[in-house]
Amino acid sequence: MNSITKKAVSLMALCGVIQGAAHASEIVMDTLLVSGGPSPCLAVRVNIIQDGKSLSELNLGPTGTLKVQKGTLVHFKKGQEYLVQASCISGSGFVQQSGLKFVADGRTIIVQFADNGFQIKRGGVAY
């Protein structure tokens, strides 16, 4: 973890109820973690796809903001295959796209803002 104070909002994706306290730089959506920080990305647009169908499109901000653009918050079901596609939304012309295809196994997916854009990676066991 970097020196930025980490805080969390825990959202239950299935019922949409906020369970934790709202904080500034980190969002936990049951199976998706967003870690904020300085970045050339004003936001990261995340598209969660299963069997070729978009389940959810989210805009994630480096300060911990979350806006559902399409669909609902997704709870990754163990044993199911997903594709997460992400792209940087930048006001400066900076371009970055990334993706991660995985079979849900109880580990979180982390979208981490960084000085050089963002990263998508697998985390530890969360569900």
Image (cartoon, helix red, strand yellow):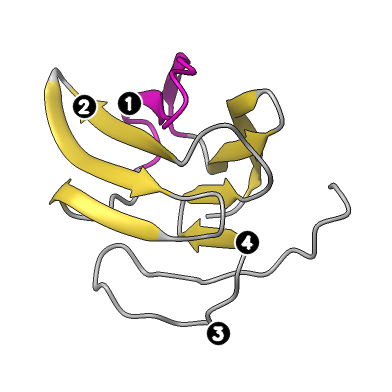
| Disc 4, SS | loop
> In the rendered image, which residue does mark 1 sit on?
82
Residue closer to the observer: 71 or 125: 71
Task: Say which residue label 3 marks.
Answer: 21
The local secondary structure at tag 3 comes to loop
Q: Is 91 a magenta residue?
A: yes
Foreground label between 2 and 3? 3
Asked if the residue under mark 4 is in contact with the one under mark 3, i.e. CB atoms within 8 Å, the reply is: no
Magenta-colored span: 77-104
What amino acid does circle 4 point to?
Answer: Ser
Measured as percent of width and height from the top left, residue 87 is found at 39, 24
Identify the residue at image location x=20%, y=42%: 56
Residue behind mark 2: 50
Asked if 25 appears above or below 43 in the picture, the reply is below
x and y, in percent, of residue 55 in the image: 16, 38
Q: Which mark is residue 25?
A: 4
Identify the residue at image location x=25%, y=65%.
14
Left or right of residue 74, residue 101 in this image: right
